[in-house]
Amino acid sequence: MADNNNSHAPSVAVLGTGIMGAAMARNLARAGLDVRAWNRTRAKAEPLAADGARITDTPAEAVDGADVVLTMLLDGPAVLDALRQAAPRLAPGTLWLQMSTVGPEALVPLARFAAEHDLRFVDAPVVGTKAPAEKGELTILAAGPQELRERAGRVFDIVGSRTQWVGEDGTGGAASRLKLVVNTWVLTVISGTGEALALAEGLGVDPRDFLATVAGGALDMPYLRMKAEMILSGDFPASFTVSAARKDVRLITEAAGAAGVRVDLVAGAAERFRRAEEQGHGDEDGSAAYYASFDG
């Protein structure tokens, strides 16, 4: 995470201060940027005032005079709604860093909005959850013109540790498509971890024997360890919630269908997240989908 603490630091409007957006806004404010933060539920944004962010009541108030608008909201419709509310005070030429996971289909109306309002658009979904976001260690998957990359980098270098540029056209969907590929793997690991530990319980196998068996080998990975520990402890602090995972499964399924690709593992994950959400685990970490392996 870089430090941009100087008089020429850009002003940034952060629209969406949930798990990820709050961490990103906090890091930007601590780095010396002029941060204005808006969230539909104001109470979720208010703690950022302690770090120097200005909390606003409306998206329009947040973007008024901002050099950069950063969106980190649940999905494409939520992003578009916030930008429409902000439209009266969006200045032509404002840099829009669209960092939500929206999928290629929902990107189309966002790109249209950017063109209609003469905004400089960069599609930049992120890889990482709560802890990397808090540490400024996200991986940013970005697509946008060369002439915008230095401006975008002043923000990306604060909220992330690495930016992977994957295209010149932010409206073309290259970054959003890559994000869905990455999340397909993420959701597969979450589901596989939950099912393996559930089967261990059902068969009377100590789950830690399973973890010891794969330890240090090709089948081991830090993400397996992190999710397994949540399941074993029964504590599921949200970093990537069951409900958010279910939304991403829908985006993956839609994109795969449009491309003529069958994603059977994703279909299985979709059912697990659906059941877990119905069991009341929607706001817990995605690893709580473990409970979908059991009735009740």
Image (spheres, helix red, strand yellow):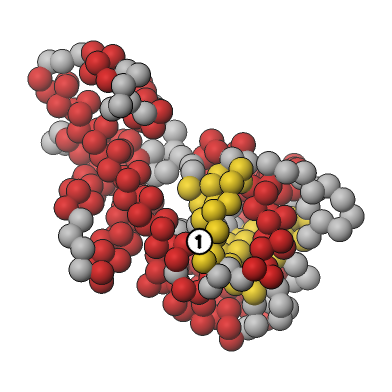
Number of residue marks: 1
The quadrant in which residue 180 appears is bottom left
- Where does label 1 land, which residue? 166
Look at the picture and state if 178 lies above or below 146: above
Give the percent coordinates (x, y) of residue 235: 39, 27
Q: Which of 135 and 60 is in front in this view?
A: 135
Give the percent coordinates (x, y) of residue 197: 22, 26
The quadrant in which residue 98 appears is bottom right
Q: Is residue 8 visible?
A: yes
Say which amino acid is labelled 1. Val
Q: What element carries label 1?
A: strand
* Lateral position of residue 112 relative to residue 104, left or right: right
The quadrant in which residue 216 appears is top left
Q: Which residue is drawn at 20% across and 56% down?
A: 263
Give the percent coordinates (x, y) of residue 272: 21, 45
Q: Residue at x 63, y 83 (%)?
A: 117
* Lateral position of residue 39 relative to residue 73, left or right: right
Q: Nearer the viewer, residue 95 or 162?
A: 162
Q: Residue at x 71, y 77 (%)?
A: 93
Quadrant for the C terminus in the image: top left
Look at the picture and state if 80 lies above or below 192: below
Quadrant for the N terminus in the image: top right
Q: Which residue is drawn at 67% across and 49% down?
A: 157
Q: Which residue lies furthest to the bottom in this view?
A: 116
Q: Can residue 75 be seen in this view?
A: no
